[in-house]
Image (cartoon, grey):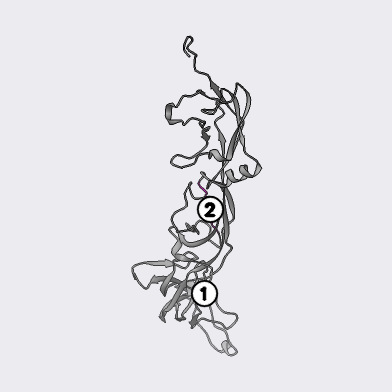
């Protein structure tokens, strides 16, 4: 509302008239807002975008440049009408009714909303490019494959689920057999995973599990000539223990890959290994390679082990 005051008259013939100005003439002028009608189109976009279908406004002044006035919209969920969002890149995937709820702009105060038609917006999942970097680990250490996703909005909770193609299926564990396995992303997880989908193809990776190195217990082995305690057969010798075998794994040395080399001792015997000091060695280079290949997930490393064989205390005076 405006207040105005009449101070005189003008015009080509104004001089022919006398206007009484002894008392100033005042009044009020009310300018009502101009009603705007609107029509919202329908369309779609991808999660992460903010574009809206075209919105046509009618009755906006444009004599000397169009007035600065736009509509403010609200997106109401098609599944839950009570759930609505301002237009934002993080509006979840779904179908929404586009409702005009107000006006904005430098000239918006001169207008008011009239009748209009709402539109429909379909928000689809955002496609993510993906890759799984290759990695190498050792048998006994649990591998941790990583999923690389490209295109996730900052702050969104979404992670790739890596699938490792193991023979017979099953989960990846620290005891997965040594070998080479292909990896890829099979799905997504996280609070915001429903707003994304994986590209139809990506970069596969490979998991290489190398055999676990083993060492031998280098503590010298000692036993008495002819003693069969513990189940030792005459002519055989105890094998050194393996250091590094995981609990529950069945891994042991094979005697036919090894031989004794005497470093000192007495005369030979046909009944048992003669008294003396020996070293345990591989039979040959081929045997060493076979020893390494004989076990899944391990690679024994043989060190020099001493075996000391002692003579029983003699009893004098008996033949």
Residue 49 is inside the magenta segment: no
The magenta stretch spans which residues? Answer: 142-148
Determine which residue is flagged by label 1.
Answer: 69
- How far across and down, in percent of the image, does residue 171 sit? 44, 54
Q: Give the residue drawn at x 53%, y 77%.
A: 7
Quadrant in the picture for residue 305 = top right
Q: Are marks 1 and 2 in contact (CB under 8 Å)?
A: no
Q: Could you tell me which residue is drawn at 47 percent across and 68 percent down? A: 87
Which one is in front, 42 or 30? 42
Q: On screen, 131 above or below 34?
A: above
Mark 1 or mark 2, earlier in chain: 1
Most foreground residue, 283 or 153: 283
Q: CA distance from mark 1 to mark 2?
A: 53 Å
Assign the N terminus to one quadrant of the image.
bottom left
**Label 1 CA crowd tier, 10 Å (few <14, some 14–19, many 20+):** some
Considering only vertical position in the picture, is 143 above or below 14? above
- Mark 1 secondary-structure assignment: loop
Q: From the image, give the main secondary structure of the stretch colored magenta.
A: loop
Residue linked to disc 2 = 145
Residue 30 in view: no
Could you say which is closer to the camera, residue 4 or residue 83? 83
Q: Quadrant of residue 269?
A: top right
Task: Characterize the local packing of mark 2: few (<14), some (14-19) or many (20 or more) Cα atoms within 10 angstroms.
Answer: many
In depth, the one of 267 and 193 nearer the eye is 267
Q: Secondary structure at mark 2?
A: loop
Farthest front residue? 319
Question: Can see residue 255?
Answer: yes
Q: Vertically, is 283 above or below 145?
A: above
């Amino acid at each position: 509302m405006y207040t105005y005051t009449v101070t005189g008259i003008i015009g080509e013939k104004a001089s022919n008239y006398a206007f009484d100005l002894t008392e100033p003439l005042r009044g009020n002028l009310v300018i009502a807002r101009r009603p705007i009608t609107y029509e919202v189109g329908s369309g779609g976009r991808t999660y992460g975008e903010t574009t809206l279908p075209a919105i046509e406004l009618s009755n906006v002044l444009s004599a000397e440049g169009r007035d600065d006035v736009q509509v403010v919209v609200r997106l109401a969920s098609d599944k839950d009408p009570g759930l609505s969002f301002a237009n934002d890149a993080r509006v979840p995937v779904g179908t929404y009714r586009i409702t005009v709820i107000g006006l904005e702009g430098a000239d918006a105060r001169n207008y008011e909303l009239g009748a209009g038609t709402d539109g429909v917006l379909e928000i689809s999942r955002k496609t993510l490019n993906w890759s799984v970097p290759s990695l190498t680990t050792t048998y006994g250490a649990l591998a941790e494959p990583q999923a690389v996703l490209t295109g996730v909005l900052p702050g969104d909770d979404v992670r790739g689920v890596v699938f490792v193609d193991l023979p017979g299926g099953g989960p990846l564990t620290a005891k997965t057999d040594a070998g080479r396995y292909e990896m890829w992303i099979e799905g997504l997880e996280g609070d915001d995973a429903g707003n994304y989908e994986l590209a139809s193809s990506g970069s596969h990776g490979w998991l290489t599990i190398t055999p676990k190195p083993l060492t031998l217990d280098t503590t010298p082995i000692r036993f008495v000539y002819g003693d069969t305690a513990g189940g030792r057969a005459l002519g055989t010798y105890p094998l050194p223990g393996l250091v590094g075998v995981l609990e529950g794994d069945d891994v042991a040395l094979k005697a036919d890959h090894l031989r004794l080399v005497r470093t000192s001792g007495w005369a030979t015997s046909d009944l048992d290994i003669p008294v003396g000091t020996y070293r345990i060695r591989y039979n040959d280079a081929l045997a060493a390679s076979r020893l390494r290949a004989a076990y899944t997930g391990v690679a024994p490393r043989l060190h020099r082990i001493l075996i000391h064989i002692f003579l029983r205390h003699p009893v004098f005076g008996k033949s």
